[in-house]
Amino acid sequence: MGAPSTASTDIGRAGALGARFLLLAVVACALMVVDRRTPYLASARHALSVGVYPVQLLVDTPSRFWRWTSTSLTERAALLKENERLKREQLYASARLQRLAALEAENARLRELLESTARVTDRVLVAEILSVDLDPYRQRFNINRGAVDGAYVGQALLDANGVVGQLVQVAPMIAEAVLITDADHAVPVIVSRNGLRTIAVGTGDTGKLRLPYLTNSADIQPGDLLLSSGLGGVFPSGYPVGRVSEVRRRPGQSFASVIAEPAAALDRDREVLLVWTGDDDPSGLAATGTTMRRAWRRIDAESLPDTVEAESTKLAESAGAEAHVADVRETP
Amino acid sequence: MRLAPLLTVLAAVVLEVMPLPPALVPFKPDFVAVALIYWSLAAPPALGLVSALLVGLALDTLTGSLLGQHGFCLMVIVYLVRKFRLRLRAFPAMQSMLVIAGLLAINEFLFLWIDGVAGRSVAISERWPPIASGTLLWVLIWSTFDRGREHAPARL
């Protein structure tokens, strides 16, 4: 370059810097608004997430290596012990599963009798949680399954004990999930003891859910089990969401303060299950709502087979009643 | 030499999403902001506004914030540093530390503010420790790496 005086170059550059800053700031703001209000940037996000995938793998490597070392250095005795325990658990679980299969068949038959939609069995896939730290003020995490595996936005995640969360973003190889305890998340639930329907809202604390829409006179008490109600169409119905731990009825206010503990081990999970509910028939939703309410009444369920069993009994009772009514109508 | 800024920023991005023991998470400094401040102060042509925006987009994708959110905040601080670069370099250590703390605070609160406008829930009290740890990190980096630069001819 020629040599104009330094001062003038500086001024020129400062002006250019300001102009460039303004232009780019407008671009950034436009991006944010479009990303917030419209779905047009989803494909751009896909492309970007493919670009940053190596970073995510790199970050996950140390903890993966650590897990690998610790498993390969475990003592033989400890492994044998664990193996034995797992075998016992497996035996126990498969015994319960046999009962569940029979009950499910019976349930479907009874539901047919009642002319209500059958509950479809859910298909699941195991996904591993990646050790990638997202914004620490939000309860989100990445899993190692993506669009390639058939995952979709809004898909429910479970673990061995209950509902974990749902997917909010899906890239080809990776997906981002939000926990049910995230402050921006809410899940429709049903109280298994009496069929009371409400909504469990996250608090931002992995050990707590809030039930803000229960009045002081609502029939709820500590120890009540909350199941996903299936309303809203995201979470399959009948999975444990949490257990009520604290109920405070405040005389001055119309709503009670109810706190529940999540059933899933949200902060200890390494693996989660992706769930595909069978065909989501929109007309089935309403039917499920009413029959479920009937069926859940006075059921205190500890786990899935128990709830199914109890529901079967209820259904059998109502089916029996209906059959009886039909008989009466036929006789004259 | 041109590779150094790129590598530092990449390392900062990796550190940013690296899982830490839960006790340390609240004190995690904004590595990327510190790296960008350092390079805009030490060697301005290395990383400019465009690279700040691009790094921000990568962070947005990694952490699931709005596209452009990180980029916008980073661009603001890079712009401020470059605009007042000569003055900042002339400041005594204590004063420049305060300015850096101020810049990191601007970064955090812009981010928070955008979250608020976008209707996401925000927690203000948890945003203070990263500013303090970021400033400490900056002091550490600046006192270690900029010794050699002091006698090099300043590039305007």
Image (cartoon, grey):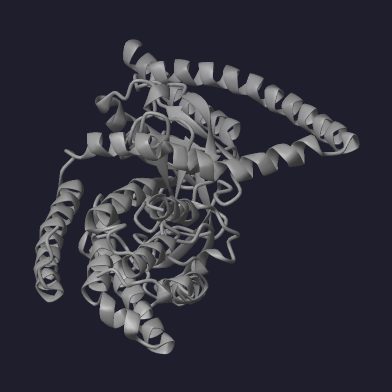
Q: Is residue A100 above or below residue B47?
A: above
- Image side of residue A162 versus residue B92, left or right: right
- Image side of residue A267 versus residue B70, left or right: right
Q: Is residue A288 above or below residue B135?
A: above
Q: Is residue A213 above or below residue A330?
A: below
- Image side of residue A222 versus residue B10, left or right: right
Q: Residue at x 62, y 40 (%)?
A: A64
Q: Residue at x 39, y 88 (%)?
A: B92
Q: Residue at x 37, y 27 (%)?
A: A147
Q: Nearer the viewer, residue B148 or A221?
A: B148
Counting from the top left corner in percent of width and height, residue A119 is at 42, 24
> Looking at the figure, which quarter contains the N terminus of chain A?
bottom left
Q: Quarter of the image holding residue B90?
A: bottom left
| Residue at far front of view | A2
Residue B153 seen in the current view: yes
Residue A239 seen in the current view: no
> Looking at the figure, which quarter contains the C terminus of chain A?
top left
Q: Is residue A159 above or below residue B81?
A: above
Counting from the top left corner in percent of width and height, residue A229 is at 40, 40
Counting from the top left corner in percent of width and height, residue A266 is at 54, 49
